[in-house]
Amino acid sequence: MTAGDAARIRRLHSEAIVIDGMNNARMTGGYFRSMMDGGITATMIPVTISAPFRQTIDQLGELLKLVDENSDRVHIIRRAPEIEEAKRQGKLGLILALEDTRQLEDDLNLIRIYWELGIRRMQLVHRLQNTMGAGKAERHDSGLTRFGVQAIERMEKVGMLVDLSHCPPKMLSDAMEVVTRPVVLSHSNVKAVFDNPYNLSDDQIEMVARNGGVIGISGLPYFVAEREPTIDNVMDHIAHVEKRVGIDHVGIGLAIFEGHPASFYDQRDRSKDAYPPPPWTWPQGIETIALFPNLTHKLVERGYSEGAIKKILGGNFLRVFKEIWG
């Protein structure tokens, strides 16, 4: 790579609105700086995985305290234009999410409450059964429940982004029949590149594209490649979605794990078929969030145009955010 090529990649990455669809790291002031070093404009972070309401509120309170302590560099995103404003100000935008709907405790009114508290994305299911349906770790895919239909309708009414990551096939197809606005699969990979039962089929990818939604390709190593994944394996997943349904429906959601104690992994209800023993190492070339610019390098290396690269890095997510949040 020439000095001119390197300069072009740095310029392109610095100009782009870079949105990481999922970050599972332990949030600290130092980690906010690491994300900014990686050129991240905004990232979706889970307040909880599957905690009940009271615990969710406690964890949200701790996160808001951390944001207040770092208000010179980060702020909570509530509307899509605030992401563009974060870019202009050189700040990091945090998009608050729930990685399950157990936090509702079967009360649809809490969707509005979470919205008022700043949550902007809800994932229907994590890995196990809840009142929406069965997660991918369950023995049977029971599809979307009646309560799940009502929850999606309420989410769309208040402007909550629906995330269908972790939905098994029938639940995913049921949900796609209910939604009327674009969805995201914030951190997902594809079977055609790595045939893991947790990854998306081409039919599922096409459903998301018809809906106008976006699939954020993750770096979760056990869904990227069979062993010792690299950043090029991540690129293969991006390339497949782009070739299958077009550039407008693919993004990046690394879902990276950094800085957690061993006890953090105990809450994830791991199954041996999908989750190897922790800790987990992200693909070579993108082992830490500060290496995010390497993804731009690889996109350039693979011949994507600057316009296409900016869509993958964040433009596609931003389009959906503008439609859902205004």
Image: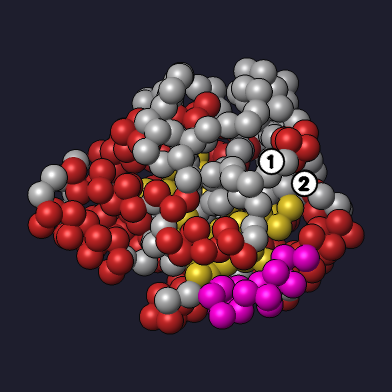
User: Residue drawn at (64%, 58%), measured in percent from left and top?
Assistant: 27
Q: Is residue 75 above or below residue 119?
A: below
Q: Is residue 240 left or right of residue 164?
A: left
Residue 162 location, quadrant = bottom right
Contact flag, marks 2 and 1 (Cβ < 8 Å) = yes
Q: Is residue 314 left or right of residue 29?
A: left
Q: Which residue is mark 1?
A: 126
The verdict on residue 74 being magenta is yes
Identify which residue, 29 or 309, lies in the foreground.
Answer: 29
User: Residue drawn at (17%, 60%), measured in percent from left and top?
Assistant: 7
Identify which residue, 63 or 33, lies in the foreground.
Answer: 33
Q: How many marks?
A: 2
**Residue 73 placement (x, y as % from top left):** 54, 75
> What is the span of residues highlighted in magenta in the rendered image?
62-80
Q: Which residue is mark 2?
A: 50
Local SS, label 2: loop
User: Residue drawn at (34%, 53%), measured in percent from left and top?
Assistant: 293
Residue 62 appears anywhere in the view: yes
User: Residue drawn at (47%, 50%), measured in percent from left and top?
Assistant: 289
Q: How is the image coloured?
A: secondary structure
Residue 28 location, quadrant = bottom right
Q: Give me the C-alpha separation between circle 2 and circle 1.
A: 7 Å
Q: Amino acid at mark 2?
A: Ser
